Image (tube, rainbow, N blue to C red):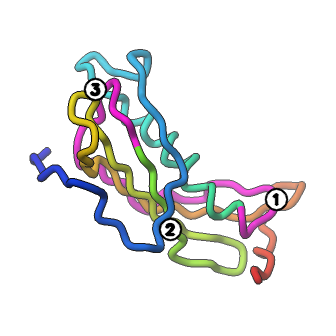
Amino acid sequence: MTDLPVLAAPALPSSNELVLKVIPMPADSNANGDIFGGWVMAQVDLAGSVLPARYIKGRMATVAVNEFIFKQPVRVGDILSFFAAVTRIGRTSITVEVEVYAERFSDQGKYLKVTEARLTYVAIDADGRPRPVPVHS
């Protein structure tokens, strides 16, 4: 991984919304002391589902992880901020982009982009079959 510059504040488009903040703990770390990538992926999936839930108004499932990029390691004690934006609404699915920024425990107030992802969620009925996304007004 390359060292990227630390930003004074997230440079985010106005369409991105803060949907989750979390602090990883020692139990979430691997043998190197960094946070497991799978733990980060699970948090991204939770964060990514927040905006589609407003449209879908019912059950939904993650149907695809279209892209997932780990830019920097996440460390124990980082304050992670998850920003999301809906990029596509289809007949039964919604695609979301999620960006994750870390405030290092020892350097709070400065943000470093650590992860970015694009996920697609599908609206499902009681039997788990795709259903149309309700018209959003």
Q: Secondary structure at mark 2?
A: strand
Give the CA distance from mark 3 to mark 1. Answer: 36 Å
Q: Secondary structure at mark 1?
A: loop
Residue 28 image point, x, y percent: 42, 22
Residue drawn at x 63%, y 56% is: 50
Looking at the picture, tell me which residue is in the foreground, 2 or 132: 2
Circle 1/circle 2 CB separation < 8 Å:
no
How busy is the neighbourhood of tag 1: few (under 14 within 10 Å), some, or many (20 plus)?
A: some
Q: Secondary structure at mark 3?
A: loop
What is the three-letter code of the residue carrying label 2? Ala
What is the three-letter code of the residue carrying label 1? Gly
What is the three-letter code of the residue carrying label 3? Asp
Q: Which mark identifies residue 34?
A: 3
Direction from residue 57 to residue 118 in the image, left or right? left
Residue 60 magenta = yes
Residue drawn at x 75%, y 66% is: 56
Task: State the residue position of label 2.
Answer: 85
Residue drawn at x 76%, y 74% is: 133
